[in-house]
Image (tube, rainbow, N blue to C red):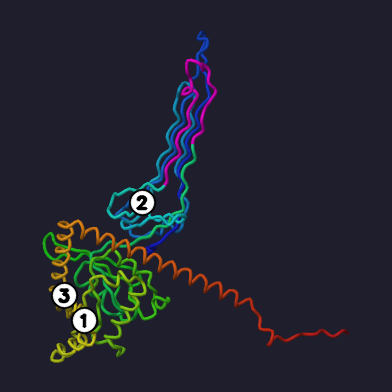
Amino acid sequence: MKFVDEATIIVEAGKGGHGCLSFRREKYVPKGGPDGGDGGDGGSVYLEADEGLNTLIDYRFQRKHKAQNGEPGSGRNCTGTKGEDLVLPVPVGTTVVDMDTHEILGDLTHAGQRLKVAQGGFHGLGNTRFKSSINRAPRQTTKGSEGELRNLRLELKVLADVGLLGMPNAGKSTFIRSVSAARPKVADYPFTTLVPNLGVVSVQAHQSFVIADIPGLIEGAAEGAGLGIRFLKHLVRTRLLLHLVDVAPYDGSSPVESVRAIEHELEKFSETLADRDRWLVLNKVDMVAEEDRDAHCQAIVDELGWEGPVFWISALSGEGTKPLVQAVMRWIEEQAEEEAQNPEVAEREAERRRQMDEEARARIEADRQARRAARQDDESDDDDDDDDYDVEVVYAPE
């Protein structure tokens, strides 16, 4: 199934049913009085997180969704039937944004969570409601109100504790295959990974974390090179970034320059995300002679001036992967414990994620506008003629 992480939809709640104007008509009962019933409420529209979904592709084909209208009231004080609510399933990790106001309506982060996105119309009142001692035969009724109409943008961000960064063919997919049951495609050419992949890393009994592999970045990704930067938004929810680096690239490129290129693209996408905790993982050390391995890896670290944690691994053979995942598990548990004990730390983390969300949304929207403007320029260029090179054809009279 195609992976789609953004969709725009229109949701419309049901209208409320009108109140009924009716009077009791029964043989041998004169002056029966009013008996018009109320209408029914219109159905509301809800979004519900479904752990069985992992893409928004269904909403690319069907964009408009409407809940059922409420039925009008009827005589004998019968109330109209309430319109059924419409529940739309979406993947866990979906953010809902009102496109007209740019307001974030909610974030569906766990299975079964529901969010009301359009309020159903309220019912109208029948004439029974207006009877009184001085108004024995009221003819007043009220109409049901319109249901709420909203233009929404659905944004899917995968839920993971750890995110993988790196150039294409840095070994990210091989690493996630090595430490989890995920089986992303692995091949000897760039951009093998086209969509984010998730894997559950089980360290020991009752200890596990989720890791996310996103398509590789290249220099100029912020300007649309390669697959661009839109997949970086899936790292917003992660707690830790693992920056995988190929220590022996087949094309002879510099591992140091590769790290700096990724850092540059990350900063252009979101400065807050660039400041996230990030560990350096030097991969494919099995491609370096064993006697030169330590010196080779240390030279990379020294040239980068890296001060954070560093791990040397071979994702293919599994060398060094176990200490790495154990260290990640310890770090995640320490962070979770600190947030549980100190509400201020938890609030700072929530604020940091909100900031990353805003920066990512603004950067992706700017990229989208730039691409749209470029397409319009191309179309206008096709219509322009260069008269300097036109040949005028003159038809001579016979």
Seen at 39% across and 80% down, the residue is 220
List the residue tagged with mark 2: 89
Image quadrant occupied by the N terminus: bottom left
The residue type indicated by label 3 comes to Thr
State the image quarter where residue 250 is shown: bottom left
Residue topped by disc 1: 306
Secondary structure of residue under mark 3:
helix
Which callout, 3 or 2, points at the residue further toward the start of the chain?
Answer: 2
Circle 2 residues within 10 Å: few <14, some 14–19, many ≥20: some
Q: Amino acid at mark 2?
A: Pro
Q: Earlier in the sequence, mark 1 or mark 2?
A: 2
- Residue 72 locus on image (x, y percent): 49, 31
Q: CA distance from mark 1 to mark 3?
A: 20 Å
Query: Looking at the picture, does residue 98 appear above or below residue 266?
Result: above
Q: Main secondary structure of the magenta part?
A: loop
* Secondary structure at numbered mark 2: strand
Identify the residue at the far top of this view. 28
Q: From the image, tell me which residue sits under label 3.
A: 321
Q: Residues within 10 Å of mark 1 (few under 14, many from 20)?
A: few
The answer to if 133 sits in the magenta stretch is: yes
Q: Which residues are magenta?
A: 118-144
Rendering coords of residue 233 (x, y %):
34, 67
Residue type at mark 1 is Trp
Q: What is the crowding at mark 3: few (fewer than 14 residues within 10 Å), some, or many (at least 20)?
A: many
